[in-house]
Image: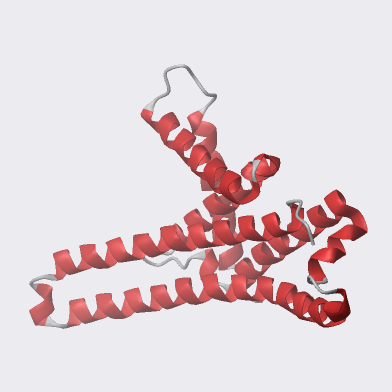
Amino acid sequence: MQDMNHVYLGIVAMGLSLGLVALAGKPSIKPTKFQAFWEGYVRFVRSMVLENMGQEGLRYVPVIGAIGLFVFFSNLLGMIPGLEAPTANVNTNLALALAVFLLYNIEGFRLHGLSYLKHFMGPNPYLAPVFFLIEVISHLARPITLTLRLFANMKGGALLLVVLVGLVVQNPFTMAVSPVFLLFIIAIKFLAVFIQAYIFMILSVVYLAGAVVHEEH
């Protein structure tokens, strides 16, 4: 039976996301620090969407926010000794990337109908067949690149963390500075956790913007 740890840990990541958001409760006139933190996250996602899609993109704030939380907490689980981030498994990332791919294409057809295909035709009608082929290949490559980018960074980061910690433990010289060195490693790892979640979010927004925003072709 294939290892299903990434599925179970993915469920844990979803549970953490839903649980912490639920704990924030309803907005209040005098929000607690915990509520203010989550309100700040919502404003961050809202700003990202507005900058790339305008007012018509506000309907996608919940889905982009959910993607960001899932990827972040999935990445974060990889920092716990003995656990592997769900996003360090290519299956988790592919499922998420395909969901984004289907979302922006379905929304493109829903909002524009068959006119959505004009996105693939390019500016010159004589070269439309060539542009169409190039664009189709480009769009089909998007879920692959989303998958491999996140997988490579999280898997590579996990392996690097194991190697560096092993060097610190086995080398008597580095044991003297190991607390500082380990804190540095953890800080770098946490930064990677945040950056990879942000990259997945912003690329999802960009792909959605390209599909739903009205523009001249």
In the rendered view, tell whether residue 50 sits above or below residue 159. Answer: above
Instruction: Name the image quarter holding residue 201.
Output: bottom right
* Residue ID at (62%, 55%): 205
Q: Quadrant of residue 87?
A: bottom right
Residue occupying image coordinates x 44% and y 30%: 35
Of residues 111 and 8, which is closer to you in this image?
Answer: 111
Residue furthest out toward the top = 29
Q: Is residue 111 left or right of residue 35?
A: right
Residue 66 position, x and y percent, is 60, 48
Of the pair 122 and 68, the residue shown nearer to us = 122
Figure quadrant of the N terminus: bottom right
Relative horizontal placement of residue 189, taking residue 19 as reference (left or right): left
Asked if residue 65 can be seen in this view, the reply is no
Q: Residue furthest right?
A: 114
| Place of residue 29 in the rendered image (x, y in percent of width and height, measured from the top left) | 46, 16
Image position of 146 with respect to 38: above or below: below
Residue 203 visible in the snapshot: yes
Residue 74 position within the rendered picture, expressed as x and y whole percent measured from the top left: 51, 59
Q: Is residue 192 left or right of residue 54?
A: left
Which residue is painted at 39% across and 64% down in the image?
Answer: 192
Residue nearest the observer in this picture, 23 or 67: 67
**In what quadrant of the picture does the C terminus appear?**
bottom right
- Is 106 left or right of 49, judged from the image as shown? right
